[in-house]
Amino acid sequence: NKIGFDDDKIGTREHATHFKIKIKKSISNRFKLTFGADFFNTNFEETFKAANGFTFSSSYNANIAAGYVEGDIFFSKKFAAKFGLRASNDSMLKESLFAPRASLAYKITKTSQFSFAYGDFTQAPRQDILKYTNQIKSEKTTHYIFNFMYAKNNKTFRAEVYQKDYSDLVKFNTKISEFNSVFDNSGTGYARGLDLLWRDNNSFKNLEYWISYSYIDTKRNYRNFSESATPSFVADHTASLVTKYWISEWKSQIGFSHSFSSGRPYTNPNQPGFQNSRTKMFNNLSFNWAYLLTSQKILYFSMTNVLGTNNIFGYEYANNPVNGVFAGRPVVPTADRFFFVGFFWTISKNKKDNQLRNL
């Protein structure tokens, strides 16, 4: 990346490599083992040259090696479990981590089941942190997920509730992460919520549709947050309706989707408090058309935000006030609508295979 801001110059280069291997072994029809390993290498360099001659360079070389083992146990036709352990070592942060994981599933009828999953997960801090310091630790989260699923006659219902606890999140004492920031792992947070999905491909001839809804309650005290609050990328409520209709005479699949979400929080410096305001609701009606040229060739067209709704994702404000007021402007998409035209050609032994179901 090469960035010019007035007469200041920023040059960034990153090389990344990822190797992975996975081996499965069936001990019996009731017990299966999976072994795997990953290796990540990231080499990063950045140079800043100011118009006044000031120069600052930062770089890092990170190696993360990890291995894991998982066991699938089938206690009966109705009850199964998966247990696993992942171990990793980060050469840059000089830390070794162990993350246990487990899940249980119980089939109550031929068409429905309950499942529960637990897991510890870790993640190295982001690039905007690592380029300034390696005197920190990986960020951690613990997941608890309870799921119910029903599937019969091409109809699916899924309900899921979850709790996620965050620890060792990176915090810094400046507006953005900078070379003179003080970094530590004192950040914490949580996320809990509900996900619902209903999918039906059977009730109406040639029509497939699904309805989804999500609710999330989350707060974090991380990065430059002055207190525990909901991040600006989170909407408490999101919902969507997706439809696909096949028209044989036109050899076409017509699709509409409508997405909705409640407002996102942001900080308005003209009012007291942190994350003290919310954007208006988000609405997006989209359209797509897939035309079957042959059994394996598809011409595809899509358009987002058909109605041209003026969606706002947040607000940016000036650093200094004028007459006691901070000037602001909304953060909006780069365009009201996006158009896409594509050609999909499936090459397989089965001459009837295509990508229509995925479009």
Image (cartoon, rainbow, N blue to C red):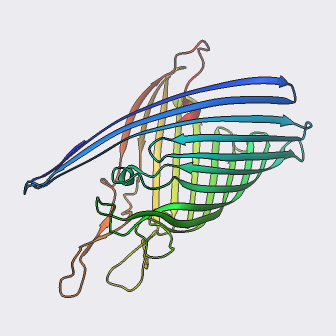
Q: Position of residue 27 (x, y in %)?
A: 83, 24
Whole-percent x and y of residue 258? Answer: 52, 55
Q: Is residue 256 above or below residue 37?
A: below
Number of numbered callouts drawn: 0
Residue 319, how many percent across, how many down?
24, 74
Instruction: Looking at the picture, tell me which residue is in the foreground, 237 or 73.
Output: 73
Which picture quadrant has residue 74? top right
The quadrant the N terminus occupies is top left
Residue furthest left as drawn: 52
Q: Answer above or below: position of 163 versus 295.
A: below
Task: Find residue 160 and report its horizontal and vertical position in percent.
Answer: 71, 56
Question: Residue at position x 43%, y 34% from top?
Answer: 41
Question: Which residue occupies the foreground of this view, 149 or 219?
Answer: 219
Q: Is residue 146 above or below residue 275?
A: above
Measuring 57% from the left and 50% from the top, which residue is drawn there? 122
Would you place residue 257 above or below residue 356 in this image? below
Q: Is residue 118 visible?
A: yes
Q: Is residue 206 left or right of residue 59?
A: right
Quadrant in which residue 73 is drawn = top right
- Tell me if residue 235 can be seen: no
